[in-house]
Amino acid sequence: MSHDTLLPHPTLHLSLPPPPSLPPPPPPQQMVMSLRVSELQVLLGYAGRNKHGRKHELLTKALHLLKAGCSPAVQMKIKELYRRRFPTKMLSPSELALPGPHHPASGGPPGMPSPAALLPMSLLGPGKHELANHPPTSATLHPVHPDVKLQRLPFYDMLDELIKPTSLASDNSQRFQETCFAFALTPQQVQQISSSMDISGTKCDFTVQVQLRFCLSETSCPQEDHFPPNLCVKVNGKPCNLPGYLPPTKNGVEPKRPSRPINITSLVRLSTTVPNTIVVSWTTEIGRSYSMAVYLVKQQSSTVLLQRLRSKGIRNPDHSRALIKEKLTADPDSEIATTSLRVSLLCPLGKMRLMIPCRALTCSHLQCFDATLYIQMNEKKPTWVCPVCDKKAPYEHLIIDGLFMEILNSCMDCDEIQFKEDGSWAPMRTKKDVQEVSYNNGLEGEQRSSSSHNGRSSSKVKVEVIDLTLDSSSEDDDDQPPPKRACPSLSPTSSPVVNKG
């Protein structure tokens, strides 16, 4: 009886259909990027790493752990957490591809993070319950995403924010710090970068670039680029070239790097499936904290910026006339009254005649500089400092002066003008012109006085000037000596004629 009851079991076992073949598991990096906060904390705790922080921090730490080469036990833990996360099936790598943020994933298991959530700028912070049992660390003293804004760069149009400004927060008391960031590109972003490639000779450039920027974590105003001390950057494991050190201005002063945006496009993986990692190391400073950000930008030329400035229009000439009247208005408390202003029509940068006169809205002077030359100089070395008053003159504050445009179009033969109290202007003659006019007037006056003194006809002045001069040396000695002061406007060749007696 017992023997008969055992027979059906092998039969039932053999009749079961074979288990369906599962696709190969995805790469460990994609497994890690699909884990939730609690699972990332378990993984980091299992590996003996700091498990505190928001999801963005936990994800970058886990990816850095994986990239540094984790033990087989940690790799098994990643697979175990992934199976718990998606117990129904193991996804293939093609199903784990990272589509763009504007194209939601389809066919994924419920709970799979959206592609936008894989980007650091879209990761949400942990809930209160996740940090309730953990004491705060030094990393939590700084907000992960402070309300920091970097100054707009005129030569770069921002297309996307790959990593929003994020604190370079230290998680220990060591002087040398290191942290890891990750971002993924969408198909649209990969296409934008690839199609902008420009190969000239042996150099390959992209007009659409992945740009890395650093600044101080200050929220009072938009921040300029500012590198932390001893900065070192690796993108996907390769060292990134930073600007060279400037020569020290004083002996004993540590040389500094000029802080400016870093183009890391050549080191970025143009892939939608493999994320990019950025490892940043630096030294801490007491009382200072820094932030970093990654943007997708499009580079523009000085020609485009000049066209944009022209498209803003020309400022009404009445603005400059009002400024002239204000400067020339008599101050009752002052003993000296200014009745006129002299302004040059030459650009202080190139010493050439102005073509497109402009200045910044924040400048209080009337003197203009040439917009074309100013923009071209800042394209090579961006300082955006007014060449007249040495104050900041950013591109967005530049205006083309309408009054100076009128003056340049109507006054072609002089390089300097004079403004009067009523806002009107008059050309100023050059020294050469003044000397020529003075010489001609002085010579004519001398001829007239000589002819009248000797009673000669004015019609023969030109013929008899020499004779009269020679005769007057003896005849006039007894009567009235000529003045010994020479007219300063006369040239050396004519001075003996006056001073001969």
Image: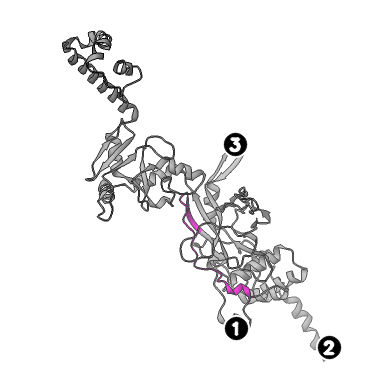
Task: Identify which residue is drawn at 50% across, 48% down.
Answer: 382
Compared with 265, 123 (above or below) is below
Q: CA distance from mark 1 to mark 3?
A: 59 Å
| Near-viewer residue (298 or 88) | 298
Sequence-first tag of 1 and 3: 1
Task: Identify which residue is drawn at 31% across, 40% down.
Answer: 342
The percent coordinates of residue 7 (x first, y second) are: 80, 84
Please name the residue that numbered disc 1 is placed on.
Answer: 132
**What residue span does the magenta drawing correspond to?**
137-160
Residue 284 falls inside the magenta stretch: no
Q: Are marks 1 and 3 in contact (CB under 8 Å)?
A: no
SS at circle 2: helix
Other residues around mark 1 within 10 Å, as few (<14) / some (14–19) / many (≥20) = few
SS at circle 3: loop
Compared with 69, 383 (above or below) is above
Other residues around mark 3 within 10 Å, as few (<14) / some (14–19) / many (≥20) = few
Please name the residue that numbered disc 2 is placed on.
Answer: 3
The percent coordinates of residue 373 (x first, y second) are: 43, 40
Which circle marks residue 442 in the picture?
none
Left or right: 363 in relation to 267: left
